[in-house]
Image (cartoon, coloured by chain):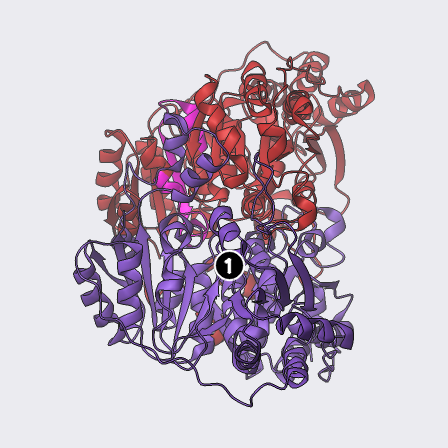
Chain colours: A purple, B red
């Protein structure tokens, strides 16, 4: 058995059954192994950012790692931005990165690059396999490392000789280290704070935003009167029918600061302490009011669900609470606005949908405006590296196996990894992409104002996506995805309903102000 | 004056007048400065790989650095692959990379990443500016560092506070360190080898492939009978009318080995010692025959032209040699093949054109088949990181100011940075892109055979760009570029001639076998 075959069998044994691949010359034996070893579905990506973003989306829904297959050095580099987002999402991803054969690298062939250095910028675990006998045990270690702490990036570099050499053996799966528990004194303090009621805010992240974690948080809020809020960047959140009605920390400094103004105690439950994405010349860095008491309950990588369970027990919470009754809105008609869009989406979203949110400036109001939709999961840009929407949707659709995925996608951000549309067409994935087409980097106009600088003609030209306008319907068709254009909410509603009733991907270019 | 304004004025004073930009929030004061400081043309890119590849193409034609403007961490990461290529091309590039304000980074905001570590993987010079007073002198140092040794990658990281803080001053340009000279004993040895005649091969790279360097190489060959050959990856080579008729080291191991079989002495003149892009299980790594004598005349970063001048003088070469007379071919008709395509291109290429070659497998025969074209420059993928063709063409067209750029572009590779088409449309650049559309990663089928592995159904699916087919005409239109489709050489000839007669970008999808 060669190294590649042992590697593949080891991955399958460890539960890795999906690989988002953009292979190159140094990965040929791995690719050949896909035909020799059953159990691993390989999905092609036209660019590496698609593969890594898809692995992120897959992990958020499947709760386990997919593999990526990336080409050495520069190929990995192309995928780093979405690995950065995956790292911030706290999901497991296993990168398999081809590289020069050990004996060839010293000759400095054209593609030689510092693959390990690149991998380490996003990975909690990085290793280069030394030989064909090491590669299977390395893979088993990598899978366990990816699953530790709820989810991390593990990168295994594969010099091509470790894949083609013979004499390798399959390695057994390795145990995943248990998530760190939370000490009692933190829970005692959290309970005391929660019992103060409305002036206490539980800021939720990671496993506190779906499944049993979210249910526990709702019971605690019901018992104590403490408020619940999701952190500003949501890796996966269960919303709509059957869930508590919870808002989200705003992205922009001013509304975030306003929202926290009346809060006296902030408890971090799987969420990080709020920080603005960027500092400004005004000196503001956090939205916290003076005198706010901030206390950690559970860090994102700790056992958040267990901590919430112990807290609920300590507080004597009721065994269940009823989710609030929802009044489904009716679709909006007429002019396009964030509020009108949110209303239509809330009305038309099918039960069990997955919403991927890279809506950036136009999309900000959509989160709060869709609280009364059917039950769905919400996946959002977590690391600020734009270009995740289409790839994450692709991976989420693979993991969701039949669940409809709806992407809320700003036009500027969509252009970084627009190639994902082709993978959606190739795999016939049920993804509906809504492009918010305002033909500019609108967020940069906002930021320019915020840092008290002025956008003159040169700056405005850099922020413009016009002259010529991007024709999204044609781009989608070029990648094999059917499309439509909407300029009013009525037109949007009709296209969206048609897409919900039709298998396969669809793209709606929505002209937004 | 704030740091951004001082930085911009320093760049303009140092001769940097073009910036390929994909800005983000942390670069707002730099962008505002573009309206306050005249002399720097900012050109927008929809993705960072477009900006960095354009800077590569610009430098190859302009012979001086453009700046890139990139967003922190992940934004830079997206641009690394084409910086890898630029590094291998030996061209000057100045990266300006926004980053978190100094005081904000410790709070680990979402986009915080190890920007310096990423930059160092491709850069000969990397620095993070400490404050507004440092940024202008840092910029002057960066430009000089980029121009050293003929061309290097210099990366200046700009925490946003160094741009918005006041009290900065413009810095004077810094002297560029002279290129290292070549010791006499190397030239004496080279002269002795050259005088052995036909069994000696001068392998040419960098400045030996255009301008006075190429003329000197031709005089040496004429005097001694030694043969001339270009290295396998050509950053910029002057070809066609008025130049010597010189082939290129093949990419694939077998033809490269055959070509060197009769050579006894290999002299490296601005070229690196030949090495295969990848090792294979057969153990081959270099194309050299047993007993080949390899001698360095001038390394790529040394003063190649001066070394050739001294060598020519030592050999008593004639002051000039006549370039060979060219017989211009007539365009090919009928079926599409690499040879037929080369003939049409050789016939129809206008004088002064710039050819950008990312033709990969179909394109390999085009180089030798166009030796008798009108005078033109040939720019090629240098570092093996695919996705350079469209971006490099964009930058070359900016630097070429009216010269027609023709891109020979494999379809798989084109998809990595296809967004470059929009910049070509926005800037109304005279770029004609020919997509070699075989709807597969053909090179990977070749490599699979070469490493003695087999492509079964799963592997073949990963190498296929079909199901659905990419519609290149629609992708081009979506980015605002006019397009046409050709399935025969006659159709190609007509579209190509029309494009040569029409200002602005055009894309031809050529169906190839």
Q: Nearer the viewer, residue B396 or B479?
A: B479
Q: Nearer the viewer, residue B299 or B294?
A: B299
Q: Disc 1 on helix, strand or loop?
A: loop
Residue B92's place in the image compared with A267, above or below, is: above
Q: Quadrant of residue A298?
A: bottom right
* Residue farthest along the bottom direction in this orientation: A319
Q: Nearer the viewer, residue B504 or B164?
A: B164
Specify whether B14 is left or right of B498: right
x then y, percent, for residue B328: 34, 29
Residue B236's place in the image compared with B468, above or below, is: above
* Point 40% across, 55% down: residue: A364
Pointer 1: residues within 10 angstroms few (<14), some, or many (20+)?
Answer: many
Q: How many marks?
A: 1
x then y, percent, for residue B302: 71, 24
x then y, percent, for residue A252: 48, 49
Regarding residue B450, the answer to whether it shows in the image is no
* Residue farthest along the right direction in this orientation: B185
* Residue farthest along the front direction in this orientation: A196
* Point 43% across, 82% down: residue: A323
* Point 74% across, 81% down: residue: A174
* Point 23% across, 54% down: residue: A336
- Magenta-colored span: B395-422
Classify the position of the N terminus of chain A by image quarter: bottom right
Regarding residue A337, the answer to whether it shows in the image is yes
Q: Quadrant of residue A433?
A: bottom left
Residue A200's place in the image compared with B297, above or below, is: below
Q: Nearer the viewer, residue B410 or B334?
A: B410
- Is residue A501 one of those drawn in magenta? no
Specify whether A178 is left or right of B355: right
x then y, percent, for residue B429: 34, 30
* Chain for disc number 1: A
What residue would you read off at disc 1? Answer: A249
């Amino acid at each position: 058995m060669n190294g590649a075959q042992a590697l593949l069998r080891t991955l399958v044994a460890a539960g890795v059954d999906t690989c988002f691949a953009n292979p190159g010359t140094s990965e040929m034996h791995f690719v050949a192994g896909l035909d020799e070893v059953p159990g691993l579905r390989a999905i092609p990506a036209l660019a590496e950012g698609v593969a890594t973003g898809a692995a992120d989306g897959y992990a958020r829904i499947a709760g386990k790692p997919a593999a990526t297959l990336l080409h050495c050095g520069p190929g990995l580099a192309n995928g780093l931005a979405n690995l950065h987002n995956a790292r911030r999402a706290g999901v497991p991803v296993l990168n398999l990165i081809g590289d020069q054969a050990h004996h060839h690298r010293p000759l400095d062939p054209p593609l030689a690059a510092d693959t390990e250095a690149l991998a380490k910028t996003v990975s909690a675990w990085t290793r280069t396999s030394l030989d064909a006998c090491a590669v299977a045990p390395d893979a088993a270690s990598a899978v366990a490392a990816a699953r530790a702490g709820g989810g991390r990036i593990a990168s295994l570099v594969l010099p091509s000789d470790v894949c083609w050499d013979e004499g390798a053996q399959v390695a057994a799966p390795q145990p995943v280290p248990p998530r760190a528990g939370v000490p009692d004194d933190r829970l005692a303090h959290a309970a005391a704070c929660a019992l103060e009621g409305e002036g206490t805010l539980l800021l939720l992240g990671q496993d506190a935003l779906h499944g049993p974690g979210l249910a526990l948080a709702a019971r605690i809020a019901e018992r104590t009167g403490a408020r619940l809020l999701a952190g500003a960047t949501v890796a996966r959140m269960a919303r709509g029918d059957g869930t508590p009605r919870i808002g989200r920390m705003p992205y922009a400094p001013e509304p975030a600061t306003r929202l926290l103004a009346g809060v006296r105690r902030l408890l971090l439950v799987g969420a990080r302490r709020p920080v603005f994405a960027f500092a400004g010349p005004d000196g503001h860095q956090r939205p916290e009011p003076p005198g706010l008491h901030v206390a950690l309950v559970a860090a994102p990588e700790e056992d958040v669900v267990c901590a919430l369970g112990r807290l609920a027990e300590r507080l004597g919470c009721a065994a269940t609470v009823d989710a609030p009754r929802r009044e489904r809105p009716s679709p909006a008609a007429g002019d396009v606005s964030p509020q009108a869009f949110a209303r239509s989406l809330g009305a038309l979203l099918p039960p069990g949908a997955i919403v991927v949110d890279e809506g950036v400036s136009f999309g900000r109001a959509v989160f709060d405006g869709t609280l009364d939709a059917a039950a769905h999961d919400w996946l959002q840009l977590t690391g600020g590296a734009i270009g995740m929407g289409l790839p994450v949707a692709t991976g989420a659709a693979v993991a969701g196996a039949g669940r409809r995925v709806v992407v809320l996608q700003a036009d500027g951000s969509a252009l970084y990894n627009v190639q994902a549309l082709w993978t959606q067409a190739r795999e016939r994935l049920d993804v509906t992409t809504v492009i918010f087409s305002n033909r500019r980097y609108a967020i940069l106009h906002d930021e320019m104002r915020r840092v008290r600088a002025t956008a003159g003609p040169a700056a405005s030209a850099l922020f413009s996506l016009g002259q010529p306008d991007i024709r999204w319907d044609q781009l989608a068709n070029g990648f094999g995805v059917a499309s439509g254009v909407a300029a009013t909410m009525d037109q949007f509603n009709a296209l969206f309903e048609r897409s919900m009733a039709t298998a396969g991907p669809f793209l709606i270019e929505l002209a937004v102000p």
